[in-house]
Amino acid sequence: MNSDDDESMDSPETSSSTTNSLKGIKIFILQAKINPEVMGALMDDAEGAGIKLVGRPEDAEIIVTEIRMRKRLERHMDWEVAKTKPLVTSAWLTSSAKAGYPFPCGEFAAVKDLAGETIRNCPDSTTCKGCAKCFSNSRSSSMQLTPDALSPPPNPLSPPTFSPATGVTLVSDSLAWDLERAKDKFDNSSRYACTRLCPLVCPNQGLVEELRVMKQARELEGEPRSVLAYSRAIAAIKSFPHRITSERQVTDLPYIGTKIGTMVADYIRTGHIPEAQAFSTSIRFRALKELTSVHGIGPLTARRLYDLGLRNITDLRNYYGVNPDNDSQDIESLTPDDIQDGKESEVGIKAVLRVYDDITTLIPRAEVEEIARCVYAELCVVQKGCAYTITGGYRRGKLMSNDVDIVFTHPTPMVDRGLCKKLVERLRSRRMVSHVMHLSSFRAPSALRKSQWDTLEKALTVFRLPPETKFYDGGKRIHRRVDLIFAPVEVYWCAVIGWTGSTMFERDLRQWTKDKRGWKFDSTGIVKLSNSEPVLATSERHVFELCGLEWIDPTMRNAD
Ligand code: OXD
Ligand code: MN
Ligand code: MN
């Protein structure tokens, strides 16, 4: 452990919030980019929670800001001061005030370049001094890390819970999991991420953030082998339950070779990985990252656009002739039939650019639940009796999601066929779906198929909640990315597992199932590689049992 870290953990400034109360915690709200109405609401929230608002960033334990970029932040505060504080979005303040205790800062890091510092300097990290407690001991951490604090929304429309035709249970039983007891069954030196516990925010999250920069740099430059090496190392570190303070601690971990081992040593010594720092400030890395943040623009296209001189979203909007202020400009005019099966088009890129600011704003859990509730209510009009699970990061315990992923099924075999398209048409007619970026139909699983992109019926959409909901705020209906996936009832739980992630958990689950069982697993089901015979599971736990795996709650599948 370097001395800087020790200082930030033990300083008297940070000690007041170790009690898990907001009372007396000193917060500075950086007003830039926050409109006066929102500022007023934030101050009310702070006051109501007993938070002490201070007038200078230097005096604060936590800084709340809506600024995301270093350059902009430096106009308002000293970068050297920023590096010593957790910088969180206003959602941290609203969510913490509502809960009555401070949420961990990591999930709300406002400035990506300071994510590591935000995690390290978070007052909540005082509960983690390199001990196994980090997995569950503090009240605010457990809010994120243990399943019981993350109860799924009650389904207001009571879907059927069982399919008599297939014996499939349609409601998850993941709540009945005792993390403390489960811990002993796992070995963090295992080579498969699906056999290790990976919390959302781990004791070495700052190191993980730096390795993520390395991984992303390789991704952007098109080096898949290197991407996989970093992904594996990150997954291994995610499941290590102690703060890493010496290189020796990681020698037993899988996938930490000499090169990454040296990076870990650098991080222990200085709190940073020099190469990651260099990428974070490089013009090319920043530009490629921004260009690929648009759905439909992959690294290859981004590099081509970069060579043409494009650097940011404004350049992309000019290049594609998109006016973000003209919200209605052909975004409403596409029909699902316009979208060619499996092909993202330029039309999709334009649609995303038009609503880019909306869809890059993170979605709180309550809004995710409201979106799912509204979509399900419309689905009931199209077809009664369906069931659904909200998957993705939401199910893994994220307090704020990038998008909403929902897997649907119907208890009667075959009734799900064609439903996705019908639902999308219904949502379009209700002006909830403004754009469909991808629509695909079902193809049966096969032992031969190589593609990792499943072939369930699915629609990747841009969605807005209808005006009458509580998230309709001040006349603004914020656009959200919503993915709708339909699975036949026999493979529902494979689809739920596949769409819950994380990516490395899934990757290793596929590898494990192939190595240990000779089966092929993906979101479309399990088949025996020898004769393409399907293997049917009746619940999520049953999938784990069939594969010969200990059950892992979704909140411990955060291997990325
Ligand atoms: C998300 C996720 O944030 O699925 O949307 O991880
Ligand atoms: Mn998601
Ligand atoms: Mn998604």
Image (spheres, helix red, strand yellow):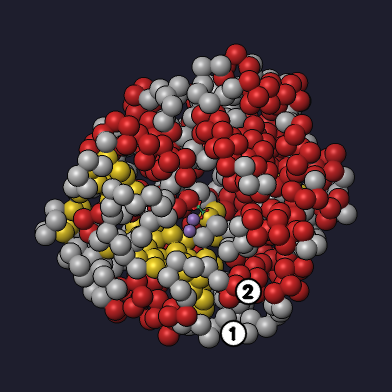
Q: In the figure, residue 210 lies in which quadrant?
A: top right
Give yes or no for contact between labels 1 and 2 (Cβ–Cβ under 8 Å).
Answer: yes
Q: Which disc number belongs to residue 445?
A: none
Horizontal and vertical percent for residue 311?
77, 60
Q: Is residue 270 visible?
A: yes
Up-down: is 443 above or below 437?
A: above
Q: Is mark 1 within 8 Å of ligand 3?
A: no
Q: Is residue 202 visible?
A: no
- Left or right position of 487 against 17: left
Q: Quadrant of residue 105?
A: top right
- Kind of element beneath mark 1: loop
Query: How far across and down, in percent of the image, does residue 48 sit?
Result: 62, 55
Name the quarter where the N terminus is drawn: top right
In the displayed structure, would residue 257 be above or below residue 531? above
Q: Amino acid at mark 1?
A: Asp
**At 41% across and 43% down in the image, what residue appears?**
506
The outermost residue toward the top is 248
Q: For label 2, count other residues whose C-alpha is less than 10 Å away and answer few (under 14), some (14-19) or many (20+).
A: many
Q: Residue at x 72, y 31 (%)?
A: 273
Q: Which mark is residue 350?
A: 2
Residue 330's disc number: 1
Q: Secondary structure at mark 2?
A: helix
Q: Residue at x 67, y 47 (%)?
A: 221
Residue 88 appears left or right of 167: right
Near-viewer residue (1 or 25)? 1
Instruction: Give 334 or 373, whichever is nearer the viewer.
Output: 334
Q: Determine whether 195 is above or below 534 in the image.
A: above
Neighbor class of circle 1 (other Cα within 10 Å; few <14, some 14-19, many 20+) is few
Apparent side of residue 284 relative to residue 456 in the rendered image (left or right): right
Marks 1 and 2, how far apart at CA? 10 Å
First in sequence: mark 1 vs mark 2 = 1
User: Residue 189's x, y, as percent?
Assistant: 45, 21
